[in-house]
Amino acid sequence: MSSPATGAPAPSVRRLRALARAELTLLGRNRGVVFTALVVPLALPFSVRPALDRLDLEKQGISVGAAMLTAAIGFSLLFAVYTSLVNAYVARREELVLKRLRTGELTDAEILTGTALPAMTLGLGQALLLGAGCAVLLDAGAPKAPYLTLLGLAAGLVLSAALAALTASFTRTVESGQVTALPLVFASMIGSGIMFPTEVMPEKLRSVCELLPLSPALRLVRAGWTGRLSVYEALGTLATALAWTLVAVFAVRRWFRWEPRR
């Protein structure tokens, strides 16, 4: 990525870095978004503890610590990445920032990626912090298959950003973004293994919920801690996550709006 002669970063890297730095500055000025992105993912996991204590998790080979860790990372994906990026994309579009950026050297992919980088970095940092905290404080222990957790986290971050851009395509204002983001938030909290693991659901319901957008990523995250996922199941779950990512990226390329919706 660097020039052999000068050692300077490639032009695309410099552009992404500059855009991400500017977006981070704008993000820091929005106290409501910062509060939602920082505090909510850290506080909400404790709300699921009473429900988890009533479930027979040991039968499924899942500890309370592993379940709460998955919940914490799920909340981080939803609030630190997805909902904050819906607001960011809509706000930048309505303020004509995206339209002006397209007149420069930045490509469409660089604009969307650069806008998403601060939120994705925040989500990654929270996930690592929460993982370490749950391992120590909740006796979740060390992950038995850490590569699955890393794959799930990477898939979740990329897909959350892509889904945020897609949701922003159909969102008229920043205020309405709080409504348009709710379907995915509620569906993921209930059906993707955040409030409680999908393994405790009835088989038919579980087979449906495992096809929700964030379900494959969270299943990989949890399986990394429990180690209860065969190679065949892991490949199938990863393929589902990749399929959702490709669909979301295609939909963004097809329907994302760069100018204000009137």
Image: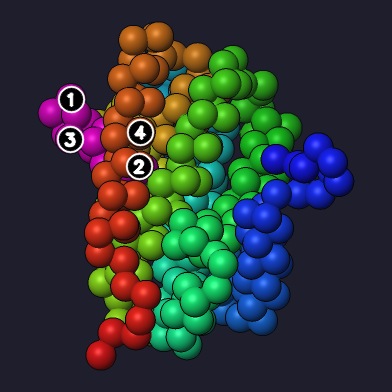
The nearer-to-camera label among 1 and 2 is: 2
**Residue at mark 1 to residue at mark 2: CA–CA distance:** 25 Å
Quick one: quadrant of the N terminus?
top right
Question: Is residue 67 shown above or below 183?
Answer: above
Residue drawn at (53%, 37%) of the image: 153
Q: Is residue 91 magenta?
A: no
| Tag 1 and tag 2, C-beta contact below 8 Å | no
Image x and y of residue 172, in percent: 30, 82
Image x and y of residue 64, in percent: 52, 31
Callout 3 environment at 10 Å: few (<14), some (14 to 19), or many (20+)?
few
Lower position in the chain sequence, tag 1 or tag 3: 1
Residue where numbered disc 1 is placed: 203
Q: Is 117 left, or right, of 252 in this rendering?
A: right
Residue drawn at (18%, 25%) of the image: 203
Residue 147 visible here:
yes
Residue 122 visible here:
no
Image x and y of residue 19, in percent: 64, 67
Residue at the extreme left: 204
Quick one: quadrant of the C terminus?
bottom left
Q: Is 133 left, or right, of 182 in this rendering?
A: right
Q: Which mark is residue 208?
A: 3
**Residue at mark 4 to residue at mark 3: CA–CA distance:** 17 Å
Residue where numbered disc 2 is placed: 245
Q: Amino acid at mark 1?
A: Glu
Q: Is residue 211 magenta?
A: yes
| Tag 4 and tag 2, C-beta contact below 8 Å | yes
Lower position in the chain sequence, tag 3 or tag 2: 3
Q: Which residues are magenta?
A: 202-214
Residue where numbered disc 4 is placed: 242
